[in-house]
Image: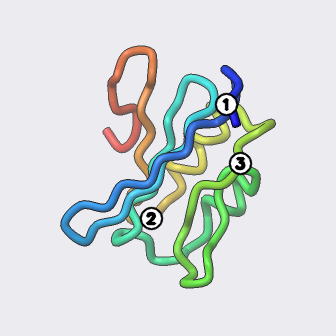
Amino acid sequence: MKQSDNSPILETDIQDDVVTQTQQVGRYKVEVIRDKCISAASCVAIAPNVFELDEEEIAVVISQDGDDDDTKLLAAQSCPTAAIVVTDTTTGEQVWPR
């Protein structure tokens, strides 16, 4: 199946027993660093179309259709352990945490 140009890109990376999951829609790429997540779920409350808790009560990135970059950034900023990294895909710069 061919992926359309505007479909989200989902990547899972496992290195040195650290799992990160990213999904990209819009200008910002959102990444959850699983080993830093403490299940506070503030990201889920702010951006339920971007994040949910999995069966281990760890935040994961889900379909982001309909959520804008400002909402994703606000959700990341609400994380008490800075487990959500936001990168600007146009510049490659990390937007959050600074």
Residue 63, numbered circle: 3
Going by the picture, which residue comes out furthest to the front? 1
Q: Residue at x 70, y 43 (%)?
A: 64
Q: Residue at x 70, y 37 (%)?
A: 1
Q: Residue at x 41, y 33 (%)?
A: 87
For residue 16, side relative to residue 32 (left or right): left
- Dot 3, how many residues are within 10 Å of its Cα: few (below 14), some (14-19), or many (20+)? some
Q: Nearer the viewer, mark 2 or mark 3?
A: 3
- Closer to the N terminus: mark 2 or mark 3? 3
Q: Is residue 53 above or below residue 84?
A: below
Cα distance, mark 1 to mark 2? 35 Å
Residue 3, numbered circle: 1
**Res. 71 image quadrant:** top right
Q: Nearer the viewer, mark 1 or mark 3?
A: 1
Q: Position of residue 67 (x, y in %)?
A: 74, 38
Q: Secondary structure at mark 1?
A: loop
Cα distance, mark 2 to mark 3? 23 Å
- Dot 1, how many residues are within 10 Å of its Cα: few (below 14), some (14-19), or many (20+)? few
According to the picture, the residue beneath numbered tag 2 turns out to be 80
Residue closest to the eye, 33 or 15:
15
Going by the picture, which residue comes out furthest to the top? 90
Q: Secondary structure at mark 3?
A: loop
